[in-house]
Image: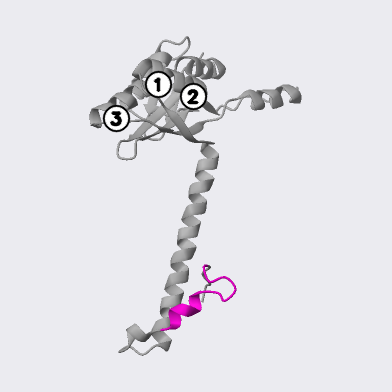
Amino acid sequence: MCEEIVLKVYMHCNGCKDKVYKCLRCLEGVEEVVVDSENHIVIVRGKRANPIQVLERLRKKYSRNAELISPIPEPENNENNEDEALEDEPQLKVMVLKMNMHCQGCADDIKRDLERMRGVLTADPDMENSLVTVRGIVDESKLVNYIKKRLGKNAEILKQETEEEEQQQQEQQQQEVYCCKISLMRSSNNCSQHCPPHSSAQCLCISNMFSDENPLSCSIM
């Protein structure tokens, strides 16, 4: 049986899928390459395929975000080297830029040129608000200079955070929305139980939703 190497590689289009396949198919020891772009999984089969070489090839030719899932490499004895490697490993950033866009053609050009920049994974332009969300491993100053030289446009970074911080913020917002809905549902049920059905305009139970100490805060009934 051929040895099987499984990697996690972020791919957002068929072009990424083809690029991953081409950079691995000619590698020494590789007999078969299976690319699952929907699940961001790459399977490499070959009796003489080296997992470390496959991983380094992907990181060099495609993206530094490639990760080796199996086989898991043996940990090194030197713990200090591991700590230094973790500290030096760049994190995926999410940056929101302010850019002028006059039409959909401008937005398409910005998306195409930014995704060609090394280290940029995705670029999502918002033409109505003149905003562009960029995800990737790239320095913000280099990104701004690249936009000015390549597109001839000025860009201002409004927000920058890591992908983990963005996910935590989204989860927190979802939790707040959920709690707010629960509070409104409970207050509505209490109101329907205590107020007469014919005089909904005279219902005063909604005032119980607010605290006397802080009238701007909601309380769960």
Q: Position of residue 44 (x, y in %)?
A: 45, 22
Q: Which residue is mark 2?
A: 4
Look at the image and say whether residue 209 sits in the magenta stretch: yes
- State the CA–CA distance, disc 2 to disc 1: 41 Å
Q: Residues within 10 Å of mark 3 (few under 14, many from 20)?
A: many
Camera-side residue of 106 and 163:
106
| Residue lying at 56% horizontally and 18% vertically, measured from the top left | 52
Main SS of the magenta part reads: loop
Q: Position of residue 5 (x, y in %)?
A: 50, 24
Residue 185 falls in image quadrant: bottom left
- State the CA–CA distance, disc 3 to disc 1: 13 Å
In the image: residue 164, left or right of residue 185: right
In the image: residue 43, left or right of residue 212: left
| Residue 64 in view in this figure | no
Q: Which residues are magenta?
A: 204-216
Q: Earlier in the sequence, mark 2 or mark 1?
A: 2
Query: As shown in the figure, which amino acid type bears the numbered disc 1?
Result: Ile
Camera-side residue of 207 and 54:
207
Look at the image and say whether residue 72 sits in the magenta stretch: no
Camera-side residue of 140 and 156:
156
Q: Which residue is mark 1?
A: 147
Mark number, residue 107: 3
- State the CA–CA distance, disc 2 to disc 3: 41 Å
Circle 1: element type = helix
Circle 3: element type = helix
Circle 2: element type = strand
| Residue 82 in view in this figure | yes
Query: As shown in the figure, which amino acid type bears the numbered disc 2?
Result: Glu
Its colouring scheme is: one colour
Query: As shown in the figure, which amino acid type bears the numbered disc 3?
Result: Ala
